Image (cartoon, rainbow, N blue to C red):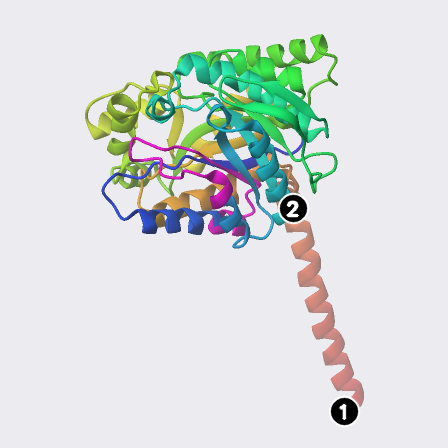
Amino acid sequence: MSRLRFGVFLAPFHKPGQNPTLALRRDLELIEHLDALDYDEVWIGEHHSAGSEIIASPEIFIAAAAERTRRIKLGTGVTSIAYHNPLWVADRMVMLDHLTRGRAMLGCGPGSLPTDSSMIGLDPTETRELLGENLDIIMRLLRGESVTRRTKTHNLVDAQLQLRPYTDPCFDVAVAAVASPTGPRMAGQHGIGLLSIGATLTPDGFDALAHHWNVVEERAAHFGQPTPDRAGWRLVGLMHIAETREQAYHEVEYGIEHWFTYFQKVAAFPQMDVGGSADVRGMIDFINEAGIGAIGTVEDAKAQVQKLVDQSGGFGAFLLLGHEWANPQATKRSFELIAQRVFPEFQGQAQSTLAAKDRATGSREALARTQLAAVEHMIKKYEQEKTTNA
């Protein structure tokens, strides 16, 4: 891949008990910051319970963010399509595609929190079965087909979209995967992108990366889809970067404990149970030592991305999992350092300026002599002119 895209996967993870209005405002301001830093995309989660992931409708949030940004693409990360009528999911996304002038993306998943699905009478097995069924309906609708179909939750009768997407032929669609091959199978079957959310959060997720893409290619061939493009593969990972490792460690003491506690004791989502120590320093060390993220310097961030490139065989976008390990100012600075120092390494922009510096360094001594000679020449010429004119 010649240019790796960078983005953010924003659940978000807010500590319960704080002002939710201000937390949502902070999320919008972060997206404005990412847009100014030239991040390529941001994906917004859908959750309805457990107190930390407080965005209920990524589509509404994207509409607000689109009016505050210029070029960054905005995706649902993910729409829990088992919870919704698939006709309305497709219809809302087409409208967002028009409102954003082609910056909207649809991420699909079964819904990660059982505390969400239980409120509408669905268990995790049912939501996963509905994911496959509803995704098939959504893709047919987006292709302009008429669909008649009864699912466990909805009855569609000659259902079709009244608008075509703004993006020709369609906006980006991706399906989420943690560790199992279910997401890769659907991505290959429908010829859509893959969101590997568990790329680094578990050993299984990291080890499964190369296999995931093999599954995508095998399923694509089975269903007669074009050869999948790795540009549509997005890997989600963890980072917090500062000028020094000591500073990064100090900054994440602000909020990393809440993040660990949420996955270990609150969210019934065992695929994301990151384990680790019970004390804050142990949590920080675990992120680095287990290889699931990078808390440290720009060089640590580069090494983590390169490790993922090597393990996967290549992918299209690296998405930083949004968190509030550090305070808002330090968090924004981390994103800024990554944009300034990590992007160029993987987007073909670093080597040209480094090569120019090396060329200038190698020729400096000889060229400096010519500069001095030129100055000496002009001094002598001036002295001659004064003598001639006297």
Q: Earlier in the sequence, mark 1 or mark 2?
A: 2
From the top left corner, tell me how far across and down residue 160 is, in percent: 67, 31
Q: Residue furthest bottom?
A: 390
Q: Which circle marks residue 330 in the picture?
A: none
From the top left corner, tell me how far across and down residue 162 is, in percent: 69, 39
**Identity of the amino acid at label 2?**
His
Query: Which residue is labeled 1 in the image?
Result: 390
Query: In this image, 76 relative to 322: left or right?
Result: right
**Identity of the amino acid at label 1?**
Ala
Quadrant location of the C terminus in the rendered image: bottom right
Q: Is residue 318 above or below residue 150?
A: below
Query: In this image, 243 relative to 380: left or right?
Result: left
Query: Which residue is labeled 2 in the image?
Result: 98
Q: Residue furthest right?
A: 388
Q: Find out whether the residues at labels 1 and 2 contact each other: C-beta distance under 8 Å.
A: no
Q: Is residue 84 above or below residue 334?
A: above
- Residue 358: say if magenta: no
State which region is magenta: 32-61
From the top left corner, tell me how far across and down residue 106 is, in percent: 57, 33
Mark 2, residues whose alpha carbon is within 10 Å: few (<14), some, or many (≥20)? some
Q: Nearer the viewer, mark 1 or mark 2?
A: 2
Q: CA distance from mark 1 to mark 2?
A: 78 Å
Query: In this image, 291 relative to 377: left or right?
Result: left
Q: Residue furthest left?
A: 279
Q: Compare residues 262 and 291 and report the one nearer the observer.
A: 262
Quadrant location of the N terminus in the rendered image: top right
In percent of the image, x 28 and y 28: which residue is there? Answer: 262
Residue 218 in sight from this viewpoint: yes
From the top left corner, tell me how far across and down residue 256 is, in percent: 28, 33
- Residue 52: say if magenta: yes
Q: Compare residues 205 and 45 and report the one nearer the observer.
A: 45
Mark 1, residues whose alpha carbon is within 10 Å: few (<14), some, or many (≥20)? few
